[in-house]
Amino acid sequence: MSQFVYLSFDGLSRGAVYAAFALALVLIWRAARIVNFAQGAMAVAAVYAAYSVTAATGSYWLGFVVAIVAGLVLGVTVERVVMRFVDHSSPLNGVVVALGLVLVIQGVLGIVYGNEFRPVPTPFSRDAFEVGGVALLSRYDVFVFAAVGAVVLALTLLFTRTNVGLRMRAAAFAPDVSRLLGVPVGGMLTLGWALAAAAGSLAGILVIPTELGLHPTAMDGVFVAAFTAAVVGGLDSPIGAVAGGLVVGLLLSYVSGYLGATVAPMAVLLLLVVVLLGRPGGLFSTTTARTA
Amino acid sequence: MTSALLEVEGLTAGYGAAPVLHDVDLTVHPGEIVAVLGANGAGKTTLLRTLSGLVHGRGRITFDGTDLTGVRVERMVHRGIAHVPEGRGVVTELTVDENLRLGGLWRRDRADARRALDEVYDLFPPLAQRRAYAGHQLSGGERQMLALGRALVGRPRLLLLDEPSLGLAPRVTGQIMALLRDLRERTGLAVLLVEQNVRSALSVADAGVVLALGRVVARDRAAALSTDDDLRHAYLGF
């Protein structure tokens, strides 16, 4: 029982990171109908920027802020300099360009920083509290929950309570109509990319210290889990992304804990296949996919 | 007559290399309802899309004495031009209230935007009862009310209205045409009305132009067009 409780909390903590990353994928999918395969590489680049600042100043928090700001800047740059010029007549074009970006970003990071794993500090202890002899959460897990929770809450308020959020949703759902109503659709798209990249960077700076360390490919595994989370929840659904992230986090934790870590990637792929076969639009999708 | 609100001269436009509109001239005066008539593929929708900047064209478009060449689509509402596109353009994922608010978000005068929103709810009571409904939950008539109402929140001077009767019962179409007349009387709104329902359009319009294969083949007062037998048989199908 104690192992189950521990695995549950561990899974939820990891799932919160997947949720933030899946949310980043969903934001861009909703705005541009592109699965941003470069999201992981962009997040790693932002974490490298944070790593440099923390190394130079000794301040984790300054590095944390730099990671988020670097994410915003990268999001704007990628949209304005690259994605805006992609021919969207075929959905594959955006995917291929994003994959090309992965190679470019990872290559540049490898040239600048080298290819060794670098340890990244955490601001709080990762030792779990024990309640009644059962290990539950570490202070770092609480920080992860709080950070992801704050982002989810902020994005929810932005999209549901503000005029900018209304413009962003309208621009994503009906770009031509929105332009006729005076919405600067291009600007909203850029803002969507910026926010998504910042959410991805947050996921990066939260998860990389808990894994092998900082490396140009450090987010590749996280991308697979978060992409699965986004598909499980429904690529069009922010709530689905958060729920999907938690589901994938729990699944990975249980499978790793009970069956072994080597089985975990297969469990994620199995979940992806089952959802795609049973409910291709995702568990939180409101649209029905054609079956014939 | 007063000076023209919208003047179009020598407008040629289309998609890619093949023009859909050829050398179109058109004038709309303040408070005037002008019907654009013609068969499927005549270029009616392309004409409206070119006027609002969604399609690039060559020629001269002047609104209230100002050249509209190079004005971006999203700036047209600032000039006083509202376009209700074919199929109504209701954002079906948003609620009725969000759709209507969207129509006034560009306005600096927030207080008047709120007043305009309230006026639209007064004008269309069914929308007031369904504020929290998503666009996809509305009937065709309600969607048309929503699309019209959303345009009115911006207090336009010219309304570009594309096929408002499409898919609607004759009774609802009649109500919409009556509303256009009423708006014209009360607010001085000018309307460029694209319609396949020729009788309905000519019943409300002051003037009309007939398009065939992208060219203006006739222009006259609405009453004259509806009694021109040759024209009716050749182009208007009634």
Image: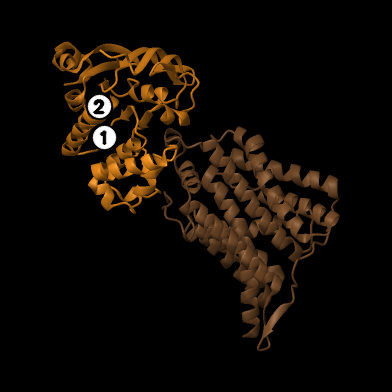
Chain colours: A brown, B orange
Disc number placed over residue B98 in the picture, else none: none
Q: How many marks?
A: 2
* Kind of residue at badge 2: Gln
Q: For the point 38% across and 42% down, which residue is it?
A: B111
Which percent across, then down, holds residue A178? 44, 38
Query: Circle 1 is placed at which residue position?
Result: B166
Quarter of the figure with residue A211: bottom right
Q: Position of residue A140 (x, y in %)?
A: 70, 70
Q: Residue at x 62, y 80 (%)?
A: A5
Q: Residues within 10 Å of mark 2 (few under 14, many from 20)?
A: many
Q: Are marks 1 and 2 in contact (CB under 8 Å)?
A: yes
Q: In what element is the residue under mark 2? A: loop
Indicate the chain on which mark 1 is placed. B
Image point (19%, 21%), residue name: B237
Sequence-first tag of 1 and 2? 1
Residue B120 position in % (x across, y down)? 29, 42
